[in-house]
Amino acid sequence: MPTTATSNTRKTATATKATTTRTAGSKSGFTADERAAMKERAKEAKSASGEQDLLDKIAEMPPEDRELAERLHEIITKAAPQLEPSTWYGMPAYKRDGKAVAFFKPASKFKARYATFEFNDSAKLDDGDMWPIGYALRKLTPALEKQIATLVKKAAS
């Protein structure tokens, strides 16, 4: 059966509608918070003011997250000054060669019950066949600050 202009038009319209629905609505599989983080990541890729972006993001945080993020920033920049402060998906991050090594995920970012301090695969934390890369964080004690500094030094080496 030969194809007609009408059947081709219907096929194109159907394909376009399916694509629009998948990427624009909730059927994309991403939450509104996740889509917002991806938009922030695209904006970050164009920005050249890494540390200022990080400080701005910290300033926007609710007090509980802001307190943790400010102290982490001090610990990390002292422990590993070679890491570049920046943002990554709208979160404070510390990069080497443009890749995030460590980042702070505030509890408010995805409405979680606790913040996390995490490392990416570019962190040099390998220890056998399994090692931790993320830590739930509710408050910082002197012992935890020392542990974080040690981990960051190792990750940045």
Image (cartoon, helix red, strand yellow):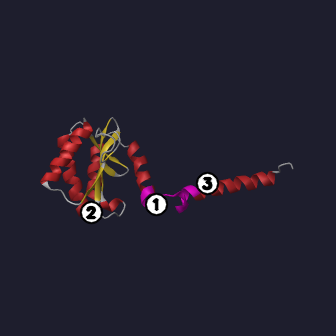
The magenta segment is 22-34
In the image, farthest residue toward the right: 1
Q: Quadrant of residue 45?
A: top left
Residue under circle 3? 19
Residue 123, given in percent of the width and then of the height, sits at 30, 40
Work out whether 66 lies above or below 86.
below
Looking at the image, tell me whether mark 2 or mark 3 is earlier in sequence order.
3
Looking at the magenta stretch, what is its main secondary structure? helix
Binning the other alpha carbons within 10 Å of mark 1 as few (below 14), some (14 to 19) or many (20 upward) gives few
Task: Identify residue type, mark 3.
Answer: Thr
Q: Is residue 116 left or right of residue 12?
A: left
Q: Say what secondary structure mark 3 lies in.
A: helix
Q: Is residue 29 left or right of residue 48?
A: right
In front of the other: 132 or 157: 132
Task: Identify residue type, mark 1.
Answer: Thr
Work out whether 97 lies above or below 18.
above
Looking at the image, tell me whether mark 2 or mark 1 is earlier in sequence order.
1
* CA separation in Å, label 2 and label 1: 21 Å
Name which residue lies at 48% across and 58% down. Answer: 30
Name which residue lies at 35% across and 39% down. Answer: 99
In front of the other: 45 or 135: 135
Residue 31 falls inside the magenta stretch: yes
* CA separation in Å, label 2 and label 3: 37 Å
Q: Say what secondary structure mark 2 lies in.
A: loop
Residue 33, given in percent of the width and then of the height, sits at 42, 59
Q: Say the numbered circle drawn on residue 80.
A: none
Task: Identify residue type, mark 2.
Answer: Pro
Residue under circle 1? 31
Is there CB contact under 8 Å for labels 2 and 3? no
In the image, farthest residue toward the left: 142
